[in-house]
Image (cartoon, rainbow, N blue to C red):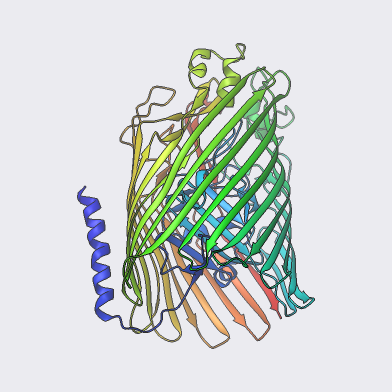
Amino acid sequence: MNARLCLLATAVAQSLSFSAFADDSDIERIIVTGDFKSESIQELSASASLFSDTEIASRDAKYLDELLNQAANVNFTAGASRGRFVQVRGIGLRSQFVDPINPSVGMIIDGINYSGLGGAAMLFDVDQVEIYRGPQGTRFGADALAGMIHMESADPTLEPSLKVKLGMGTYNSWDAGVAAATGFGEKSSVRASFYQNKSDGYMKNAYLGRDDTQGIDEQVARIKLHFQLTEHWRTEFVAHFMDIDNGYDAFTLDNSRTSVADQPGKDEQESNAFSLSNIFTGFDFADVELNLSTLDADLLYSYDEDWVCNDPDQPALCKAGLHPWGYSSTDSYQRDRQDNTAELRFDSKGGNWVTGLYYQSRDVDLVRQYTWNDGDFKSNYESENLALYGQIETHISDKTRLVTGLRVERNEGDYSDIYGVNESVEDTMVGGKVALEYQVVPRTMIYTSVSRGYKAGGINAEAIAKANDEGLSQDAEFFLNHRTFDPEYLWNAEFGVKGKSADQRLNLRITAFYMYRDNIQLKAWKTEGQQFAGYFDNGSSGENYGLEIEGEYALSPRLTLSGSLGLLESEIDGFFTADGIDQSGREQAQAPNYQYAVNARFNITDALAVNVGMEGKDEYYFSDSHNSQAPSANLLNASIAYQADYWGLNFWVRNALDEDTYNRGFEFGNNPVNEYATQTYVQYGEPRVAGVSFSYEL
């Protein structure tokens, strides 16, 4: 409790300092668009980070995980070719295998729900990335227990425009993109873009003699159409086409970047997505918006389970695979996912209330091809969500505003598989938010809020399969008792200060938070020899609390400092692993005690700028089911950019000191040479990478 009071006192002290030197000048408006309305990030009664296209270009970030270290209390894991899974304040998924998953951190791109499909987060022609921390229960519902990522690509323009990007870098990497927009008719416009990104990746495969078994090969095309059909009727159409054909060859028995896998895996996604929005503003009482979207994604995730070769002609490389019983295994998960959503929304003319009805269906077919299974394992999971929501803003005084929101959501899920198993879950969940905002002076706002988020219960498909396969399972009774798991609720209390100094040089956002996880959902594993079964279980509860600070300071007309700091304490209560280990009192996985980022931008001339930054995080646990940890890390990044009227050059480097980082880790026995002794195995993060990019915009 003393720690929480200290955090609160810190935030209050900052609010008083802002009040002391603020005047009535207008503040710079950094607009976020992912909530119910577009508003300044300084006026949003929530903790959020925003990255503009300028910040994306400075880091030459091609994908979301190349930005996330800049945000306070945001972490990610790979378990694939990319950092597909995001955690906010220590809450979020870390992988997906057999089981259907319900995301903890949602992802919306151009109004399309990509939650659980992190591979779609490519950044070319994206105007900005917004990260909302804490439950977004009123706005986004079951997909946003811990937070939401909102990405918006560039809109069409009536005036012709052109954007070109060419880049090359280490590890035989290159990327190229083009985007163009124009108007047609009097009030309609279109924008289209195409982007290709390729790299050999950061692993070498000594057995196959290849450098690209962890390679990147990604393409994305986007189209946006805006039609002003009448004075009061506007239509917006979006289409996305993605083709991701990445390799997956990440783990080794000696924890090096040199693999000897004879059957490296794949990480693929082919998806088509469309959305259609119709906005009618002709009514006197409210604007009406009807949003429809559909997504069809074919996914493949596969890997060499033993990580080694089994070749008698290569005894030096393949010694771990040359044991008497000829162990060699692969695992493959092919998913066909189809999503459909519909939302009918009413926004008041005065902007003080909004209400709506939301529907989502998701149909996922899985085919698992596993060496130790007798034939393919097939399953289907169909889910439907229906939600009613509303939010009201009440102006108590000229300086005080009360925001009240509520969302009621019904989730139904039906599971079936080739074993003849049929299982269903049904949950009615309630979430919402109450926030009190006080505008101390025009540039300083303080707020306090209480919000409730929720995450639907689900089905442990792998546990069900194990329970019904006596030939593989020695613990059928254990798995029968873990067929399903219950919903989780998250209570979140925040106190925040957002302000700008009177001289316009300092912009600061501070949030102290406390979160209580009720019926906490945790991923666990049960081991049988060299085979593993994952399942979700409900612990009693969990606590997450801390502080988030983000801001910018113009030290001089040419030197600007920016940065973030996240402090986080977390705890598990009432959770036992499958091996009987009591994890009560331990920190939650993916929850480092601190994260920071500090960046300095120096404009040498009006056209030439240098950026130097440090980012780091504390050690943290890889998983809730074992106690292996990722070590602390501190990374140096830099860039030199030249910008003329229409074109620019950017020389960049990330992780300049080539520090080893890890974005996934397991603890088990997988090495026959040491008689399958339990040890930690890790997947490496990005090493030192550098390159140059050319851009042209007209």
Front position in the image: 31 or 436 = 436
Vertical placement of residue 479 versus 634, above or below: above
Q: Horizontal and vertical percent for residue 220? A: 73, 57
Q: Horizontal and vertical percent for residue 82? A: 61, 49
- Asked if residue 184 lies left or right of residue 618, the reply is right
In the picture, residue 314 is in which quadrant?
top right
The number of discs equals: 0
Vertical placement of residue 252 versus 493, above or below: above
Q: Horizontal and vertical percent for residue 79? A: 58, 42
Q: Residue furthest left?
A: 2
Vertical placement of residue 631 versus 130, above or below: above
- The quarter of the rendered structure image containing the C terminus is bottom right
Front position in the image: 237 or 164 = 237
- Asked if residue 675 lies left or right of residue 224, the reply is left
Vertical placement of residue 428 versus 268, above or below: above
Q: Residue at x 52, y 78 (%)?
A: 610
Q: Horizontal and vertical percent for residue 627? A: 40, 35
**Residue 542 visible, this angle:** yes
Q: Which residue lies furthest to the front in this view?
A: 284
- Asked if residue 485 lies left or right of residue 298, the reply is left
